[in-house]
Amino acid sequence: MFFVHLYTPIGFIKLSFDKDFVLLKIEKSNPPKESKSEEYPKSVKFLLESIENYFSGRVLKIEYPVNLKVLSQFDRKVLNFIMNIPYGNILTYKFIAEELRTSPRAIGQALHRNPFPLIIPCHRIVRSDGTLGGYSLGFEAKKWLLEHERFILCRLLSHKISPFYGY
């Protein structure tokens, strides 16, 4: 296994890869004990740049191939649904449960098992009462990501909308 630790605005994350540099998991981590400057393959460099660009607001989606085959058919179904939620949009566990004909709790459990929380944007799912709910990278991370996306969208939209001053 191969690991990369990356400092982000939501804290340190650890990216785990197999021997062929296929991404296995993204998870919260502590700062690495020692820092090595390694030369990464192009695919890993691309992912690291994509994550940095997402956090700086230069890209709206982190593109990287992920393998969901190790997950159950139900989890794959939920995560495939989540992948199609546009940047900055928020849905509820209940809405997704109704769409997939299951319970909100089952949706929450499937999202808890999401091995790729930045690539499959499960932070965009909240409770029906508007509270955030859980997130594998932490509550504060979920809050930060939602606020970040809202800010970037507002900034992008403000450049496309010309003001109307009336006649």
Image (spheres, rainbow, N blue to C red):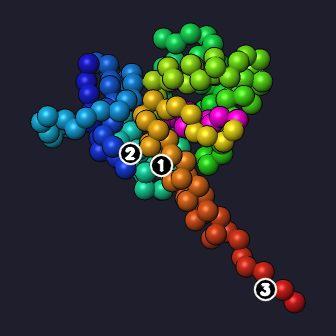
| Residue hosting label 1 | 144
Percent x, y of residue 32: 19, 35
The residue that appears at 39% across and 24% down in the rendered structure is: 25
Secondary structure at numbered mark 1 = helix
Nearer the observer, 90 or 25: 90
Identify the residue at the far right of this view. 167
Dot 2 or dot 1: first in sequence order is 2
Q: Residue at x 67, y 29 (%)?
A: 93
Residue type at tag 1: Trp
Residue wearing tag 3: 165
Is disc 2 in contact with disc 1, using a CB cutoff of under 8 Å? Answer: yes
- Residue 42 visible in image: no
Q: Position of residue 65 (x, y in %)?
A: 48, 28
**Residue 109: x, y in percent?**
56, 19
The 10 Å Cα crowd at callout 1, few under 14, some 14 to 19, many 20 or more, is: some
- Horizontal placement of 63 versus 37: left or right? right
Mark 1, mark 3: which one is toward the viewer?
1
Measured in 3D between alpha carbons, the distance from the residue under mark 3 to the one under mark 2, in whole angstroms, is: 40 Å
Q: Is residue 123 visible?
A: yes
Depicted 44 relative to depicted 149: above or below: above
* Amino acid type assigned to the residue bearing label 2 in the image: Ile
Specify the segment rendered in magenta. 118-128
Q: Considering depth in this image, is 10 or 20 the residue closer to the camera?
A: 10
When asked about the image quadrant of residue 131, the answer is top right
The crowd level at tag 2 (other Cα within 10 Å; few <14, some 14-19, many 20+) is some
Q: Which residue is mark 2?
A: 10
**Numbered disc 2: secondary structure:** loop
Which of disc 3 and disc 1 is earlier in sequence? 1
